[in-house]
Amino acid sequence: MTVTPTVLFICQHNAGRSQLGAALLDHLAGGRFTAASAGLSPADVVNPAVAATVAELGVDISGNVPREVTTADLDEADIVVLMKPGLALPSTPRGEVLEWSFPNPEAWDADAVRPLREAVGAQIQSTLLTR
């Protein structure tokens, strides 16, 4: 029996970057990983522009609810991806920590988010899918 590694994407509000990372990993990895996302101070809703750009790929995250990262999340994740370097986590992750640097798309429209979507997808391809 093969264990599917869990990748936890974390950003500040769990509305944009981390949601994007988890959605793209699910889309690109073909079940090789379990993707999750969380934030340090969750927003009320997923960024609509981010949801719209992943919907273009056939992935619906519009019903996702931003949530706060927990110690249990950090204990269970095999890989923790910080979508912004230096985030102060509530505990030390058990798994490997990757620090990526992507801008916060909080006030962006879908046209502005598309290049971010492509950059995050490329980072996933080169960093996670080559394992």
Image: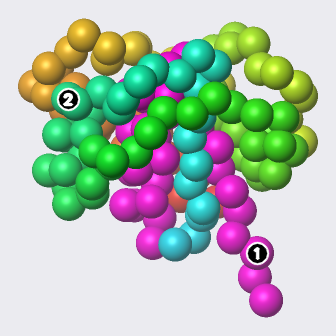
Instruction: Reply above or below: 129 against 96.
Output: below
124 up-or-down from 83: above or below: below
Tag 2's secondary structure?
Answer: helix
Q: Is residue 84 magenta?
A: no
Residue 62 coordinates in the image, percent (x, y): 28, 45
Of callouts 1 and 2, which one flags the residue occurring earlier in the amino acid sequence?
1
**Rounded to the nearest whole Å, what is the CA distance between mark 1 and mark 2?**
34 Å
Looking at the rendered structure, the kind of residue marked 1 is Val
Q: Where is residue 89 shown, x and y percent of the image?
A: 77, 20
User: Which residue is outermost to the left?
Assistant: 111
Q: Residue at x 59, y 26 (%)?
A: 39
User: In the rendered structure, does residue 8 fall within the stretch colored magenta?
Assistant: yes
Q: Is residue 36 left or right of residue 110?
A: right
> Where the N terminus falls, by quadrant?
bottom right
Q: Is residue 98 visible?
A: no
Which mark identifies residue 49?
2
Answer left or right for 47 relative to 127.
left
Q: Position of residue 56 (x, y in %)?
A: 14, 50
Magenta stretch in the rendered image:
1-30
Q: Which residue is mark 1?
A: 3
Quarter assignment of residue 91: top right
In-image side of 63 versus 88 (left or right): left
Is 36 on the left or on the right of 113, as rendered?
Answer: right
